[in-house]
Amino acid sequence: MLDQKFNQLFATFEKHMGGKPTIIARAPGRVNLIGEHTDYNDGFVFPIAIDRYIRVMARPRDDRQVKIYSLDFDSQSEFSLDNIQHDNENTWSNYPRGVAFHLQEEGYSLRGFDAVFTGDVPLEAGLSSSAAVEVAMAMTFEKASHLEID
């Protein structure tokens, strides 16, 4: 199954971005065994990773454009790192946009990239699919921009 998803992601990258990816990132979904919704309310939590992932294949660009294709939504979105705006049409793209915005707010100098991503973390199931997208995209920005982020 993993090989099939990897091959599908690779083929989709070649089709939509042309060429081959040079960065591969993934981040797991998670579940809280105790402490649901308390992590941001100063309570105790016990989150664990699950065996479902968001997977990203990317290639750095020589400019500050970010071009992302979501295999799961069969949709593409682009934005400039110099003018990150909310996307009302492709709302899934607001997660990578938010990551870029906050990394730059923290002083990181980002480089653009072309990326394709997919996942098997169920949406809206309380398994942190959006957080997995954000972590995978943060790792992609880190590698594309030659950064070291704690």
Image (spheres, helix red, strand yellow):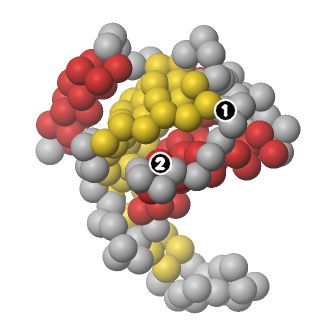
For label 1, count other residues whose C-alpha is less than 10 Å away and answer few (under 14), some (14-19) or many (20+).
some
The alpha-carbon separation of the residues under discs 1 and 2 comes to 13 Å
Identify the residue at image location x=47%, y=61%: 130
Depth order, front residue of 31/132:
132
Depth order, front residue of 128/148:
128
The circle drawn on residue 93 is 2
Residue 99's place in the image compared with 12, above or below, is below
Dot 1: what SS?
Answer: loop
Percent x, y for residue 117? 36, 40
Q: Is residue 74 left or right of residue 136?
A: left
Q: Which residue is mark 1?
A: 81
Q: Is residue 1 left or right of residue 112?
A: left
Identify the residue at image location x=26%, y=49%: 72
Percent x, y for residue 139? 57, 39
Residues at marks 1 and 2 touching, judged by CB atoms closer than 8 Å: no
The image quarter in which residue 41 lies: bottom right
Q: Residue flagged by tag 1: what amino acid is it?
A: Leu
Q: Is residue 140 left or right of residue 128?
A: right
Residue 144's place in the image compared with 3, above or below, is above
Identify the residue at image location x=33%, y=11%: 19
Percent x, y for residue 12? 24, 28
The image quarter in which residue 106 lies: top right
Q: Residue flagged by tag 2: what amino acid is it?
A: Ser
Q: Is residue 75 visible?
A: yes
Q: Is residue 21 left or right of residue 88?
A: left
Percent x, y for residue 33? 47, 83
Q: Earlier in the sequence, mark 1 or mark 2?
A: 1
Q: Is residue 134 visible?
A: no
Q: Single out the residue that lies furthest toward the front.
A: 88
